[in-house]
Image (spheres, rainbow, N blue to C red):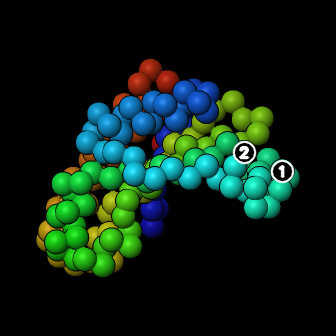
Amino acid sequence: MSYTHTATVSLSYEDAVARTREALAEHGFGVLTEIDVKATFDKKLGADAAEAVGDYVILGACNPTLASKALAAEPELGALLPCNVVVRRGAGDNQTTIEAIDPQTMVTLGDSDQVREVADDADARLQATLAAIIGGNNIDV
């Protein structure tokens, strides 16, 4: 089972991160957390590890309405929140990859109708987010 939706675009890393933030906001998501993986690897593991991962950020996106519905249905789903969205670009690459968690993963772990409804809504929003990021850019899904 694939657990992400992926788009590859011809945007610089910086532009892809900015466009991802904008598109998430357009579709009802705020960014609660941000992990700069390259900076963390550089600090903890050294420059070689940082260069090996390339530019890599994990955005912890959350739609409060959907999160509250999911937690009301199954409080343990909090371990899966927020919805992570990755923007990454390897050294020397000329394209940037954006990956969003497939919320249908929650459905395989929980079995309530409420969770299925939340996953369907979040899935539609995240796929619309990726479509908005792509715009007129080249994409590989």
Q: Position of residue 83 (x, y in %)?
A: 38, 57
Which residue is painted at 51% across and 43% down in the image?
98
Examine the rendered structure and indicate whether residue 122 appears above or below residue 108. above
Can residue 97 be seen here? The reply is yes
Which residue is painted at 25% across and 61% down in the image?
67
**Towards the viewer: 126 or 42:** 42
Numbered mark located on residue 47 in the image: 1
Going by the image, does 133 lie left or right of 91? left
What amino acid does circle 2 point to?
A: Gly
Q: Position of residue 42 (x, y in %)?
A: 77, 53
Q: For the N terminus, which image quadrant?
A: bottom left
Q: Position of residue 127 (x, y in %)?
A: 34, 44
Q: Are marks 2 and 1 in contact (CB under 8 Å)?
A: no
* SS of the residue under disc 2: loop
Q: Position of residue 87 (x, y in %)?
A: 55, 43
Residue behind mark 2: 54
Farthest front residue in view = 43
The local crowd at label 1, few if under 14, some if 14 to 19, many if 20 or more residues have their Cα within 10 Å, is few
Examine the rendered structure and indicate whether residue 78 appears above or below residue 94. below
The local crowd at label 2, few if under 14, some if 14 to 19, many if 20 or more residues have their Cα within 10 Å, is some
Q: Give the label, 2 or 1, closer to the camera.
A: 1
What is the distance, in whole Å, between disc 2 and disc 1 at their CAs? 10 Å
